[in-house]
Amino acid sequence: MKLTTLALCLGLCFAASAEAKPHHECAQKQDLISSLKLNADQSAKLDKLMAKHREAMDKLRDQHEQHHREDMAEMKKLWDSQRSDVATILTPSQLATFDKMQQGHHHPRPPMDDQFDDNDKPRAE
């Protein structure tokens, strides 16, 4: 049970970056210390371990976000190219209808994780 609790809490800590949710992370750390009855040495070692893994997770998340932005920019280029090609065969009226149809098919993306507050509610814009 203790190992499962540690794994779960570590997973939750990894998901929260230090800048985004410091009070949440601190509460999780205190919960780990009290639930597992960690001594000072164990607590210090756990802090170092969590910091190391948090840095790796933050780096991985940043890389993922960068790749996502690059992919979205490439998709926009493809969509723009497609529209330009379609415009060569449609009349202006048909093109206007085509554009309206495309807008109707475009669904807004859900907010990214950093757009949620500590209660998993979307942050106000």
Image: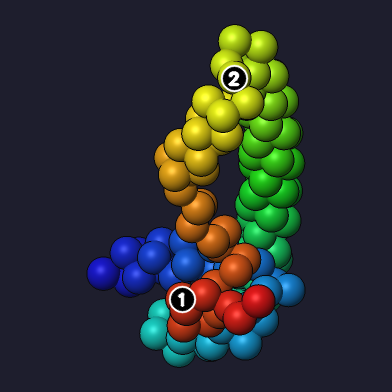
Residue occupying image coordinates x 41% and y 80%: 36
Query: Left of 48 or right of it: where is 14?
Result: left
C-alpha gap between disc 2 and disc 1: 47 Å
Residue closest to the eye, 18 or 36 = 18
The quarter of the picture where residue 53 lies is bottom right
Kindly report which numbered mark, 2 or 1, lies closer to the viewer in this rendering: 2
Figure check: 40 above or below 16: below
Residue 92 image point, x, y percent: 63, 26
Q: How is the image coloured?
A: rainbow
Is label 2 in contact with label 1 (beta carbons under 8 Å)?
no
The answer to which of marks 2 and 1 sits earlier in the sequence is 2
Amino acid, disc 1:
Asp
Q: Does dot 2 land on a helix, a strand or a loop? A: loop
Q: How many C-alpha atoms fall within 10 Å of the one at disc 2: few (<14), some, or many (≥20)?
A: few
Residue 18 image point, x, y percent: 69, 72
Q: How many marks?
A: 2
Q: Which residue is mark 2?
A: 91
Residue occupying image coordinates x 51% and y 52%: 109
Residue occupying image coordinates x 57% and y 34%: 96
The quarter of the picture where residue 87 lies is top right
Q: Disc number at residue 89?
A: none
Residue 17 in sight in this render: yes
Amino acid, disc 2:
Thr
Residue 78 in sight in this render: no
Q: Split into 4 quadrants, where in the image is the C terminus? A: bottom right
Q: Does dot 1 land on a helix, a strand or a loop? A: loop
Residue closest to the eye, 116 or 73 = 73
Q: Disc number at residue 120?
A: 1
Residue 54 image point, x, y percent: 66, 59
